[in-house]
Amino acid sequence: MYEDERDVRERDVRERLASHADEYEVRGPLHEVPPHVTYEVTLDGRRAVCKLATSDEGDPATEAEILRHVGRETSISVPRVLAAGVDHFVAAWCDDAPQEAGVVDEARARTMGAGLATLHEETAVDAPGFFEAADGELALDARETWHEAVCAFLSDRQAFLATHDRGREYADVAADALAFVRDRPGLLAGAGDPVLCHGNYLPDHVGTDGGDVTCVIDFEHALAGPGEHDYWRTAIPLRSNEGERAESAFRAGYESVRPLPDGFDERGDVYRLVNTVSYIRSLFLQGNVTGEEAEHRAERMAEYVRDAIESLQE
C-alpha cells in the first residue's frame, strides 16, 4: 500500500473509532489485504482490533454479527465485538489469536479438526444460504437447497471475474464450472444438514494450545451449509501445505467429535472444483500476487477446473 493510501486508511479508522468513543488510539496496521484492512487500536483504553472494508466486496458488519452469535451460542472462543458499523467492527484483542500460521504438526491438525467439528455440532441452521446483518441481528439469505446455494456461490465468483480487468479472461472458466454444477442438482446430495461454516478455517485463523482451540478469528467467508463444505475448505490447503499426515490427523480430530456423512469422499472432487474457482477470484481480489506469477497461478488453477469438469463428467 502506498504511503498516502495508508494515511487515508488510518484516517478512516480514526473516524470509525471516534463514532464509538472519545478515547481511542490507532497503533498501526496488522493486515492489509483487500477487501479489508485490520488495525491494532485502543478503544476506551482497551486494546482492540478494527477491521474496515475497503470495497463493497467486504462486509465487516455481517462478520461482527457472526462473531457475536458464535460467542453467545457456542463453546468456541472468538474475539468479543466492542462496536460495529456498516463497514467496520472493533473487537477486543485476543492474546490467544494466532499471529501467524506456525507449524502444523499432527497434534495441532487434530486439535483444529476437533474444533471445527465442535463449531458445526453447536451451530445448526434452518437452511443453507448466506449470512447478512439486519438491524443489528444476524439474518440469513436462505436457499431451498444446498445445490442452489453452491450455484449462487459460483455465480458470485463468476460475476466478480467478469468485471475485473485482470480476472476477466478467467470468467469463462467460472461460468463453465457454474453450468456444470447447475445441470446436476444431485451432485451434492447427501451432504447433510446446514451448519455455520467458518469458510476459511486455516492455521493462521485458529489459535491452539495443547489439545484446545483457544481462539478463532476471520469469519468473513462464513456461510450456512453442510459441514463438509467447511471441512474441504480447510483440508485441501492443509494437505497441499502440510502434507497427507496433517490432513489425516485433521480428519481424525473432526471425526472424534462429529461423523462425516456417507459419500463424503466421493463429493470431495466437487468441492475441489468449487473451491478452485473461489481461489481464482481471491487471487485477483486480493492482488497480493501480481505480474507473471499471478497469471501463472491463475492459469494453473483454470486448467485444474477444466480437467476436473472433464473428469467428473466421465
Image (cartoon, grey):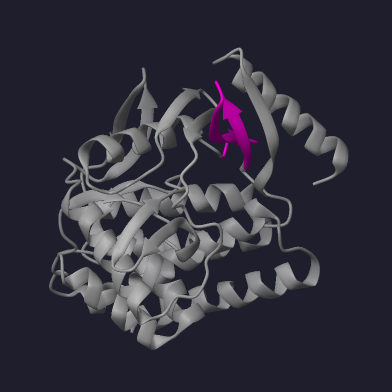
Tell me if residue 196 comes above or below residue 142 in the rendering: below
**Magenta stretch: includes residue 56:** yes
Residue at the extreme front = 45
Q: Does 40 sit left or right of 257 as displayed?
A: right
Residue 181, position in %: x, y? 35, 63
Q: Residue at x 62, y 33 (%)?
A: 41
Residue 106, position in %: x, y? 36, 81
Q: Residue at x 80, y 66 (%)?
A: 291
Magenta part of the chain: 37-57
Tell me if residue 150 comes above or below residue 26 in the rendering: below
Quarter the C terminus occupies:
bottom left
Taking depth in this image into account, of 56 and 124 the one nearest to the observer is 124
**Magenta stretch: includes residue 110:** no
Residue 33 appears in the picture as rendered: no
Q: Quadrant of residue 80?
A: top left
Q: Does 127 sit left or right of 88 as displayed?
A: left
Q: Does 33 sit left or right of 264 as displayed?
A: right
Q: Residue at x 21, y 38 (%)?
A: 73
Residue 242, position in %: x, y? 47, 81
